[in-house]
Amino acid sequence: MNADMLESPANILFSFADGLTQETLVPLAATLISYPVAYIPISAVQTSFLAGQPLDVYEAIVLPATPPTSPLPTFRQHTLLMFSCPCSLAERDHELSPDRITNRLQSQFQERLAMIGLSLSIHHRVEILERVAL
């Protein structure tokens, strides 16, 4: 797919076989939209993950590059993406540490957003949830 997209970036159409499950489609979607981390379900019936596990939660928020000066309602902020990664993975793999993930998100989006007068703020927190669902 990547080779096809690089060869002809316009008007690319892909068709998938019928019957694909979340085991295949979730990691594919994560790859296509460049998420740094994706949970890969172990079966088509699995609906929750990582109960009670500490998670690094990231939220990338788009903001105006300069504060609005007009009293008219303007663009304030928008969550571009939000995802989590088990803290235990970041402890084992430096590429998944909060500093590295934050830097990767900034480098991936900031330049393009600046071209249209926007900036990016990355928020990181650690959460423990009863369940994480797709």
Image: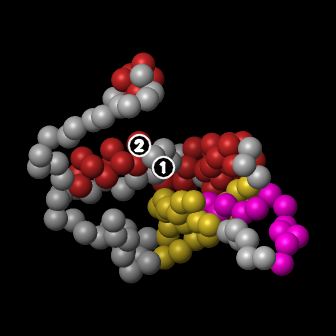
Is 35 located above or below residue 43 in the figure? above
The answer, for residue 6, to whether it is visible in the render is: yes
Q: Are marks 1 and 2 in contact (CB under 8 Å)?
A: yes
Kind of residue at disc 1: Tyr
Quarter of the image where one finds residue 32:
top left
Tell me how many marks there are.
2
Q: Quadrant of the N terminus?
A: top left
- List the residue tagged with mark 2: 31
In this image, 49 relative to 92: left or right? left
The answer, for residue 124, to whether it is visible in the render is: no
In this image, 4 relative to 69: left or right? left
Residue drawn at point x = 43 percent, y = 29 percent: 10
Question: Percent from the top left, x then y, of residue 124?
Answer: 64, 65
In this image, 40 relative to 110: left or right? left
Examine the structure image and report whether residue 67 is included in the region drawn in magenta: yes
Question: Dot 2: within a 10 Å radius of its alpha carbon, few (fewer than 14), some, or many (20 or more) residues?
Answer: few
- List the residue tagged with mark 1: 35
Q: Residue 80 versus residue 46: which sits nearer the camera?
A: 80
How far, Cα to Cα, is label 1 from label 2? Answer: 6 Å
Question: Percent from the top left, x then y, of residue 22?
Answer: 23, 55
Range of magenta residues: 60-71
In this image, 85 relative to 131: left or right? right
Kind of residue at disc 2: Thr
What residue occupies the far right of the structure in this picture?
69
What residue occupies the far top of the structure in this picture?
7
Question: Dot 1: within a 10 Å radius of its alpha carbon, few (fewer than 14), some, or many (20 or more) residues?
Answer: some
Q: Residue 26 versus residue 89: which sits nearer the camera?
A: 26
What residue occupies the far front of the structure in this picture?
72
Is 85 located above or below residue 127 in the figure? above
